[in-house]
Amino acid sequence: MEEKKVLAYPIVAVNDADTKHFFDNRYGTGQSTIDGILRSTNILIAGSRFVVLGYGWCGRGVASRARGMGAEVLVVEVDPLRALEAAMDGFRVVPVAEAAREGDVFVTLTGNLKVIRAEHFEAMKDGAIVANAGHFNVELDLEGLAARAASKRTVRASVEEYVLPGGKRIYVLGEGRLVNLAAAEGHPAGVMDMSFADQALSSAWIAREGRRLEKKVYRVPHEIDREVAALKLATMGIRIDRLTDEQARYLASWEMGT
Ligand SMILES: NC(=O)c1ccc[n+]([C@@H]2O[C@H](COP(=O)([O-])OP(=O)(O)OC[C@H]3O[C@@H](n4cnc5c(N)ncnc54)[C@H](O)[C@@H]3O)[C@@H](O)[C@H]2O)c1
């Protein structure tokens, strides 16, 4: 919208604050997505093949939590850097068509549409569980699945069973909406506090500075990120060190130690 000059006022991209996506997206989504899957299905994660589609901030969180609970985690990506990171984090990186055949549980966290399509649903094992924790309800092609399904019924709260011709059953959680909101309670307050602090302090900043800002997208000022992180540490009773004057001078200099 900035490029097309259709922004009506200055915007602060709160999602890009470090104290938002490092924690809310990674640990909030990581935990609450698993929570939604467990509340709706009560499956055993240990020993399952758990496919994470999208290895961004949210995907990293879900992948690490699923691994922590004993799943074998497969990652699907389109970005070579993110795919490489997932591989070096120790996850098996595979194309979606391959993951579709192997997975027991699938979670999309890409912000993109139709990441799991009809041909992937058709390739899945009988009993596969599919959820979305990314962007609205567009990441799963549920229309494509419904068009191929012989029948559909609700088998538990937030769980819909699609039966494909031939008898294969696919379980979709929360109608493809964000599973952590549809089937659980969203993120814990212990991580939303930072996201809301970012919003509140950014609102105050834009109220103070707004007249000097243009109709563009602005980063959350670094000082706000540092303040929110420092306040969060204080509430957790965690104290950290400060640079000595000598260390600060050393880090700022180029004459010494080069
Ligand atoms: N469930 C929640 O409560 C919650 C919380 C925060 C963010 N979100 C949403 O989750 C989504 C992801 O957020 P993020 O911070 O991880 O974003 P991100 O941009 O860091 O990560 C998204 C990743 O998905 C990958 N991707 C895109 N298309 C793909 C495809 N077709 N197949 C495989 N991978 C693909 C991208 O390469 C990227 O690495 C966003 O839509 C965001 O709004 C949800």
Image (cartoon, grey):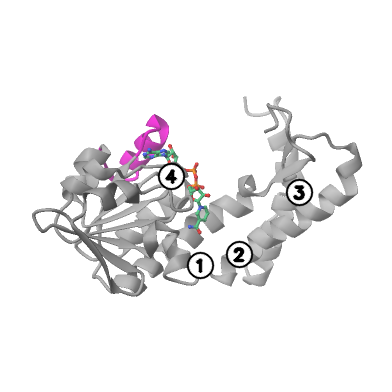
Q: Residue 226 location, x and y as percent?
A: 71, 52
The residues colored magenta run 77-94
The kind of residue on which mark 4 rests is: Thr
Pointer 3 or 2: first along the chain: 2
Extreme-left residue of the structure:
166
Dot 1 alpha-carbon crowd within 10 angstroms: few under 14, some 14 to 19, many 20 or more: some
Quadrant of the drawing holding the N terminus: top right
Q: Secondary structure at mark 2?
A: helix
Residue 81: in magenta span? yes
- Position of residue 204 relative to residue 37, above or below, is above
In this view, the residue in front, 197 or 39, is 39
The kind of residue on which mark 3 rests is: Glu
Q: Residue 116 location, x and y as percent?
A: 31, 45
Between tags 3 and 1, which lies in front?
1
Q: Residue at x 63, y 29 (%)?
A: 257
Give the residue number, with chain letter if any, for mark 1: 186
Give the residue number, with chain letter if any, for mark 3: 223
In this view, the residue in front, 232 or 245, is 232
